[in-house]
């Protein structure tokens, strides 16, 4: 139970807090505090305690004059595409649109009625009856794949039901229809989560419409003029919402944090056709229910749409950034909600003039996703927990999540620094939890201390690793993501790789298959990783029938490099193999095409460089990859369970292949991956220096400063031996502790 | 420890046995005893004890005159295609041949040497250098799939290495070459297993050669004339050996009990081309390493070859059967070694005049495979253990295997009777184990008793079930088989279905997809089963893109029938589904094409007809089928583990779908399947009658005789309540017990 009872008055709370805040913070700066209206006194106290040098408002809040006059830098959230319902009510044809797919509906007879909206949230979505269904929609027989001619169906606009006149009995049909998104999904999410009742629904708008775009620019100009006190315009975010569609039970139905679904409109489709010379189909968007998932290998048509949309978004964004600069302010982008088309790893992002980026730190991977973005002057991490009632409720101890979040992020920050930190949400909520307030004070001090000691530099890397998939650099640190920083059953075996790498003393590069085919792999790279489920954009699917790719990688590994395959790497049924680089890894998967051939397993090896100090039996290798097997008896199998391989290695020319079935994140798993990478690279000799004997502790090395930081990645005390240049050091670190050693 | 010590003399053994055999058997007949030379006295005693009415020799043994004059029917093993090395030594070009695949060999340069025989057993196989390699072989770039022109490679006949002149570096190559099988694989197996040392290797011959065929017929004629005492010619088997290829370590390398690999020759290929108008490629046989596996969906070319070979084999076999009949003897076929082309479920088998069939009883499924064969007058089961040193060694108790084998077979015999039983191997070995001798006496008596009480009739079935796969009737009771009656990691989840059904009170029909498409499903069928790994001939792979098949089955189930899908049924990526009948079963598998769509699971249901009296948590559902999920919240999920579905059901029109992830055989698993089938058929009301409350006991019902048999399928005592017409009966059965009840 939290000590504050329900009836405790906010006044008493403030007094007790103020008393508590008399201590000065160790340091100040690099910290952004969220504030809100009628909360100046506590805001001031917390700003002092947390060493804040900047203050911002949150969604739906405004800053008091008292707060504005505290002498801090002022960030203001700015929403370019919502908050003007009066303007939009007359222009509902310019709200963002999306192609939705009806449920699959079975024809029991030669006519069939397909209801469109039965499983969609009517407060969010509305059938677009304005753009001709015959022209823009598609009815598909999913049993054959055939498109039903538009003359054979019609919309009943009263009931939002499509009548198909000549269906084939026992075939399933879908209707892909254009829908208006009439409620901004972020406000909708916040509205439902916070139970805002009859608060007005905000209507978003699509900047493709010239009148809307003009309105946006004019509104921004006016706002800039009206808000001289604002130093930093924090765009939250720009124009198009990532895919977030709710169902008829007000629950999430479709989600994709990197999804381009809600960027479509008749106008945009026409512009696309004019530019690219071909017309996109509704099916290019819904893809039989994939909805442009990043797990599906992107088609050329999909890539064209991404490029087309990104160019438009970035042009419009550049105009806004210029307006901000003209007003003498800084432009900051929140890598969050309406970020589609602003992909910060796209080629042109660095040229857009954005001053800063801020993003939500969910874990180490998302920290790196923010910290590694090129072309901005500074990067700010918004840490968790968000000050919302889902974490801050009576009896909760949000400091637990704060420390957990900090430990995950810290590993990553030591590798690639953030310049600033902050929190988000409602300060009035956070202020009720003194343990949390203290935790943030400590975290903020440590954040600044790391920055100062490291000089804001990256720690040294000792290995160069390239991740190879269909997306490459464009989705750096976003691989395997569905919802932001939320691993689930389907991706946890793979996402753990990124999370492990995010805080590892290796340099990580993201390459696409196209990059490898066009430019090869830079000689500085030591190890290539290919990971993911078979047939996905991450594993690669059919690309592995490309003999150039396969032979290039074989030759590259044989020259003395490493290849680490995870899950179903290089998988496609072709030429008598399933894993096309089975010869490199020594492991293939039986897909019931070689059952006639006996499989003789080598003895499982006990002792090996890769599992030194690691109890393989205790590890979670993720979901089993069924029916993997060593291709011959010279393969070294380190772990197998129920007849499946979890960890194996194979010599390949002068290089090495390693196979791992999967790797959810844990400190020990990260250690195993680190060892596997050094081993694959043939650099076992370089492993122990600048390292910690205890997998729960990691070392960041700053050679220019002759300094190392040792962190304890757990909440309990840890003892470790750290190996320096030519000495070792025994250390005991408290839970979440960090220690700096000069050498 | 067995009571017989090593030094115990065979003489003392005989005396003690003879004393023991004074008791008469309860009954005689229907039993075939294997005998051997110099073993008349014990043979006579065991014949009495086991109630034998027929005596046969085993591979490599002869019967004594004393045995021949015992007044029993005499079976003689007959090997049409071996045992005449003198004849064959001059005709080594007429030994059976096979297309072998070299190991995949990586080109590191533009020339490449591929050794052919490095991993093959040189005592069994020899490169065929007589048939032009350029004409008959194939060199394939497995990285591209391209065939290398014959002008670009050549064989070094000294070293059996193929030199490729213009390889592509970093591509893998294979050579498919024709090889002579110079050692009969059955004799080889027995030779190696029994350590026969320098005993001569028997050379098999290929009956395609007219001279060989004439020799075979002449030899048989002479043999028939020379062996007037023989009543039954037991062909062991006919001409072509199933695929059994050994490696350079004298261990099994390639095996397929239903495999047609060793039927090829230049002559046969030419005849085929003349008849079918196209030429088969080596790749049609080796198929990138599948070697014609029955798990791979059979191509039209493969089916053509099977038909072509079967016709030839059956014609030749018919000639031999006629010769046997002309000599006044019976012809019996052993469904065993050289049975390729004699498939007893092929259309014409019943017309060949064969009198009897005998096969090895490995379990219930193989019992049914023998017992259900149409067109012969009687079926004999050869029970296990085989009297070989691998089961009969000092300290062993082979009676354990005998009882286990009997319990498995008995379930099946009660459903579909065998007319005769017997054992095989060396009687002198078996005679050393008195516990075993007693066990066989009891089993033989019980076998005869079942036959007598049931009148040799099948027990009543209460449900009609059809198994649907690519093979259908042609491979009845042979589904999922690689080696005879040997479940392994890869097939155990599926083979258990057959084993469960083999002793279940259901009528089982085997249909091919082609049957369903051509003729539909007979209205008498209650439930269709589709089972197997994705993409296999059993699950069906691409056939499920056939909208006729899919819509036919939908309509069939909706009319009030049942569909049971096991493993990855109806699986192929098409139209937004992976399981094409996901709508029927309520379950689909996430193949990373719908991760953007939220999956909401229904509550797992506890109580249900399907798991009444069964603890689902204790079951082994086989290897997990990863990422299965209910397609909506109206699906009933009965069991799920680690986020995967094991057992679920769905209403579909007036019918029902059931999904099971897998089902290795056990009594409880068989019970679950039985319940699932009755439930799918909507016949729960008819379930409890003629059934046993205890899953370890089963009931066979003979309505004409107003009789039921209750069997205990375990080796320990069981108590059960049996439901009759309008009464129940409590029973306690000893381990392996059977009880008959008249009502």
Image (cartoon, coloured by chain):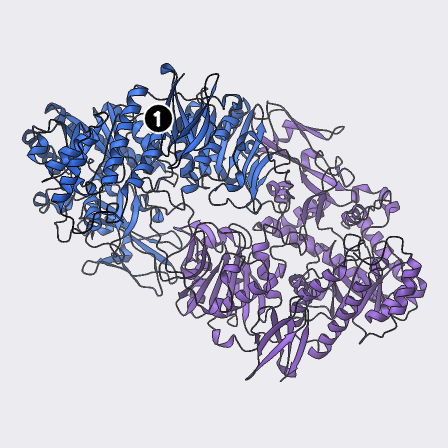
Chain colours: A blue, B purple
Q: Residue at x 76, y 53 (%)?
A: B239
Residue A242 falls left or right of residue A582? left
Q: State which quadrant residue A260 falls in.
A: top left
Q: Which residue does the image show at 64% across and 46% down from the upper left?
A: A596
> The N terminus of chain B appears in which quarter of the rendering?
bottom right
Q: Give x and y (percent) for residue B163.
A: 67, 26
Q: Give the side of residue B436 with respect to residue A449, left or right.
A: right
Instruction: Give the residue number, with chain letter if any, for mark 1.
Output: A414
Residue A564 picture location, percent across and down: 49, 32
Which element carries disc 1, helix, strand or loop?
A: helix
Pick the quarter of the image with the C terminus of chain B: bottom right
Q: Residue A628 in the image: x percent, y percent?
A: 55, 42
- Along the line of sight, which residue is nearer the eye, A693 or A293? A693
| Relative height, residue B684 to residue B290 (above, below) | below
Q: Is residue B492 above or below residue A577?
A: below
Q: Classify residue A606 by image quadrant.
A: top right
Residue at 67% over, 77% down: B739
Residue B52 in sight here = no
Crowd class of label 1 (few under 14; some 14 to 19; many from 20; radius 10 Å) = many
The subunit carrying tag 1 is A
Residue A588 position, x and y percent, is 55, 39
Quadrant in the rendering for residue A485: top left
In this view of the protein, which residue sits in the foreground, A565 or A276?
Answer: A565
Q: Nearer the viewer, residue B272 or A216?
A: A216
Question: Can residue A146 be seen from the camera position used here?
Answer: yes
Number of numbered labels in the structure image: 1
In the shown orientation, is residue B103 left or right of residue A147? right
């Amino acid at each position: 139970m939290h000590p504050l009872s329900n009836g405790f008055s906010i006044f008493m709370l403030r007094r007790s807090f103020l008393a508590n805040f008399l201590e000065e913070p160790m340091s100040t700066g690099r910290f952004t505090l969220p504030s809100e209206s009628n909360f100046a006194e506590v805001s001031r106290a917390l700003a002092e305690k947390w060493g804040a040098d900047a203050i911002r408002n949150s969604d739906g809040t405004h800053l008091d004059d008292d707060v504005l006059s505290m002498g801090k830098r002022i960030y203001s959230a700015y929403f370019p595409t919502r908050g003007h319902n009066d303007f939009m009510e007359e222009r509902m044809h310019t709200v963002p649109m999306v192609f939705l797919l009806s449920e699959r509906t079975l024809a029991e007879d030669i006519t069939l009625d397909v209801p469109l909206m039965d499983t969609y949230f009517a407060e969010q979505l509305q059938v677009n009856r304005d753009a001709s269904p015959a022209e823009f929609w598609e009815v598909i027989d999913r049993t054959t794949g055939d498109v039903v001619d538009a003359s054979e169906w019609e919309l009943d606009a009263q009931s939002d039901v499509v009548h198909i006149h000549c269906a084939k009995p026992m075939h399933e049909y879908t209707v892909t229809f254009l829908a208006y998104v009439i409620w901004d999904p972020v406000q909708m999410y916040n509205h439902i989560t916070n139970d805002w009742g009859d608060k007005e629904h905000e209507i978003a708008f699509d900047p493709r419409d010239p009148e809307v775009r003009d309105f946006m620019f004019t509104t921004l100009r006016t706002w800039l003029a009206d808000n001289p006190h604002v130093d930093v315009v924090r765009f939250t975010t720009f124009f198009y919402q990532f895919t977030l569609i709710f169902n008829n039970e007000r629950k999430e139905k479709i989600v994709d944090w990197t999804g381009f679904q809600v960027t479509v409109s008749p106008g945009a489709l026409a512009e696309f056709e004019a530019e690219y010379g071909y017309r996109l189909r509704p099916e290019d968007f819904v893809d039989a229910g994939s909805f442009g998932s990043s797990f599906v290998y992107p088609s050329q048509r999909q890539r064209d749409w991404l490029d087309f949309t990104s160019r438009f978004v970035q042009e419009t964004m550049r105009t806004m950034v210029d307006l901000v600069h003209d007003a003498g302010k800084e432009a900051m982008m929140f890598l969050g909600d309406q970020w589609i088309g602003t992909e910060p790893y796209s080629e042109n992002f660095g040229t857009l003039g954005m001053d800063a980026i801020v993003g939500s730190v969910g874990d180490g991977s998302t920290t790196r996703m923010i910290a590694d973005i090129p072309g901005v002057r500074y990067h700010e991490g918004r840490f968790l927990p968000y000050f919302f009632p889902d974490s801050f409720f009576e009896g909760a101890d949000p400091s637990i999540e704060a420390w957990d979040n900090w430990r995950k992020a810290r590993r990553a920050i030591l590798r690639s620094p953030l310049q600033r930190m902050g929190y988000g949400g409602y300060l009035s909520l956070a202020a009720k939890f003194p343990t949390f307030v203290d935790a943030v004070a400590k975290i903020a001090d440590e954040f600044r201390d790391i920055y100062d000691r490291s000089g804001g530099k990256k720690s040294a890397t000792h290995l160069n690793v390239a991740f190879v998939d269909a997306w490459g650099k464009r989705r750096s640190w976003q691989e395997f993501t569905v919802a932001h920083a939320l691993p689930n059953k389907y991706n946890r075996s793979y996402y753990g790789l990124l999370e492990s790498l995010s805080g590892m003393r290796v340099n990580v590069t993201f390459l696409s298959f196209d990059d490898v085919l066009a430019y090869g792999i830079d000689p500085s790279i030591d190890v290539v990783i290919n990971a993911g489920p078979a047939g996905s954009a991450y594993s690669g699917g059919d690309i592995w029938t490309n003999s150039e790719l396969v032979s290039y990688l074989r030759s590259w590994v044989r020259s003395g490099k490493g290849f680490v395959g995870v899950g179903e790497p290089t998988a496609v049924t072709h030429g008598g193999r399933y894993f096309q680089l089975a010869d490199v890894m020594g492991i293939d998967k039986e897909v019931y095409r070689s059952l006639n051939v006996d499989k003789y397993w080598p003895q499982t090896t006990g002792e090996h460089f890769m599992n030194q100090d690691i109890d393989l039996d205790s590890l979670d290798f993720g979901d089993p990859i069924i029916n993997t097997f060593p291709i011959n008896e010279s393969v070294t199998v380190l772990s197998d369970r129920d007849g499946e391989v979890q960890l194996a290695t194979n010599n390949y020319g002068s290089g090495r292949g390693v196979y791992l079935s999967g790797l959810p994140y844990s400190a020990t798993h990260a250690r195993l991956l680190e060892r596997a990478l050094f081993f694959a690279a043939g650099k076992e000799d370089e492993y122990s220096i600048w390292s910690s004997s205890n997998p729960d502790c990691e070392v960041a090395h700053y050679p220019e400063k002759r300094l190392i930081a040792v962190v304890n990645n757990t909440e309990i005390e840890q003892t470790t031996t750290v190996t320096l240049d030519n000495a070792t050091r025994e250390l005991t670190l408290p839970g979440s502790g960090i220690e700096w050693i000069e050498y």
